[in-house]
């Protein structure tokens, strides 16, 4: 990845294009431009046959500059850094801050490309790209641009193996709030690749990660539980909590059960039933010396 920083101090995770992909894109572009130049030259040969040699030379130079210099500049400007070769290879020219290029960037790259690519047959561009840490040629350095990869192959996400059945629900009361995301990532990477590791190395890594989890949770290590099984059970517990939290219904929205009376709109209030008042029973005052006897 490339540590490109925007004006808002945001680090962009862009992957710079390297020499093989850039060379393939340039070769594809040159094939198209040279083919167009040859077709135009054949057409001009019949059109300017009646002119003198000076005029023919001027027209030839103008057509060369137009097709091999002007057209690439126009294509990169209008397509925001995606020529035919770069489109086929999944590349794009961007500014150093990750934004789209403009005409001045394409002009500098095209002018330097005449020296780097055409006059030296790409030798200078290859050397500069190999020396640069981000694979930039001289045109990119002077223009303040960078060629990046747009089509990055996605990494296959391996599922975490489930814990043994006898450990299911054993860590429901474990406090996982103090476990950092970096440790969770390390545990997940270990569990998805533990079958590819050497048994001794894998056991040592599992023991170290289990000790880190125990230190973060504050709970003592379970007795008789292997470190790898302990890691599987704790990760499974966290996934269960995340799933329960994600699919928990909102308290403001009542769950629909399909039973019970339908809600009544606010515009039609339900009349309250009329209840008859209870009869008043006279009570005699208590006599001196105690409560009144029952009637």
Image (tube, rainbow, N blue to C red):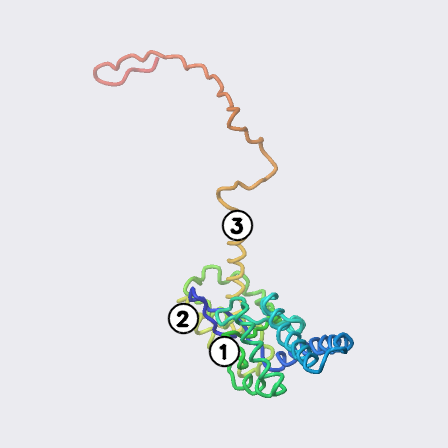
Q: Residue 248's mark?
A: 3
Which residue is more in the foreground, 20 or 30? 30
The nearer-to-camera label among 1 and 3 is 1
Location of mark 1 (residue): 142
Q: Residues within 10 Å of mark 1 (few under 14, many from 20)?
A: few
Q: Residue at the location (43% across, 66% down)?
A: 7
Query: What is the secondary structure assignment of the residue under circle 2?
Result: helix
- Residue 134: x and y, percent? 52, 79
Report the side of 248 relative to 53 (left or right).
Answer: left
Q: Quadrant of residue 278?
A: top left
Tell me the CA gap for discs 2 and 1: 53 Å
Tell me the CA gap for discs 2 and 3: 30 Å
Q: On the rendered image, what quadrant is the C terminus found in?
A: top left
Q: Residue at the location (76% across, 74% down)?
A: 47
* Among the two numbered marks 1 and 3 on one chain, the one whose residue lies closer to the N terminus: 1
Q: Residues within 10 Å of mark 2 (few under 14, many from 20)?
A: some
Above or below, comparing residue 198 to residue 97 in the picture: below
Q: Residue 215's mark?
A: 2
Tell me the CA gap for discs 1 and 3: 55 Å
Query: What is the secondary structure assignment of the residue under circle 3?
Result: loop
Report the side of 283 relative to 262 (left or right).
Answer: left
Pointers 1 and 3 in contact (CB under 8 A)?
no
* Among the two numbered marks 2 and 3 on one chain, the one whose residue lies closer to the N terminus: 2
- Residue 215: x and y, percent? 40, 71
């Amino acid at each position: 990845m490339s540590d490109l920083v925007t004006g808002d101090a945001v680090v962009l995770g862009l992957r710079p294009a390297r020499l093989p992909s850039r060379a393939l894109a340039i070769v594809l572009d040159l094939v198209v431009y040279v083919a167009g130049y040859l077709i135009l030259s054949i057409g001009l040969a019949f059109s300017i046959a009646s002119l003198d040699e000076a005029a023919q030379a001027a027209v030839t130079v103008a057509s060369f500059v137009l097709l091999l210099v002007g057209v690439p500049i126009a294509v990169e400007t209008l397509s925001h850094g995606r020529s035919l070769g770069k489109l086929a290879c999944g590349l794009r020219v961007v500014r150093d801050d990750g934004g789209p290029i403009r005409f001045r960037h394409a002009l500098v790259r095209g002018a330097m490309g005449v020296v780097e690519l055409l006059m030296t047959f790409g030798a200078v561009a290859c050397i500069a790209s190999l020396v640069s840490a981000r694979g930039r040629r001289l045109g990119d350095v002077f223009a303040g641009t960078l060629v990046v990869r747009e089509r990055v192959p996605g990494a296959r996400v391996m599922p975490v193996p489930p814990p043994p059945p006898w450990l299911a629900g054993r860590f429901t009361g474990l406090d996982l709030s103090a476990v950092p995301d970096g440790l969770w990532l390390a545990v997940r990477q270990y569990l998805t690749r533990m079958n590819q590791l050497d048994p001794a190395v894998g056991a040592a890594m599992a023991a170290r990660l289990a000790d880190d989890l125990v230190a973060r949770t504050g709970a003592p290590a379970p007795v008789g539980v292997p470190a790898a099984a302990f890691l599987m059970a704790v990760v499974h517990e966290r996934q269960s909590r995340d799933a329960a939290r994600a699919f928990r219904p909102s308290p403001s929205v009542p769950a629909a059960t399909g039973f019970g009376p339908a809600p009544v709109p606010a515009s039609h209030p339900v009349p309250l039933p009329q209840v008859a008042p209870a009869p008043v029973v006279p009570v005699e005052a208590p006599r001196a010396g105690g409560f009144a006897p029952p009637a």
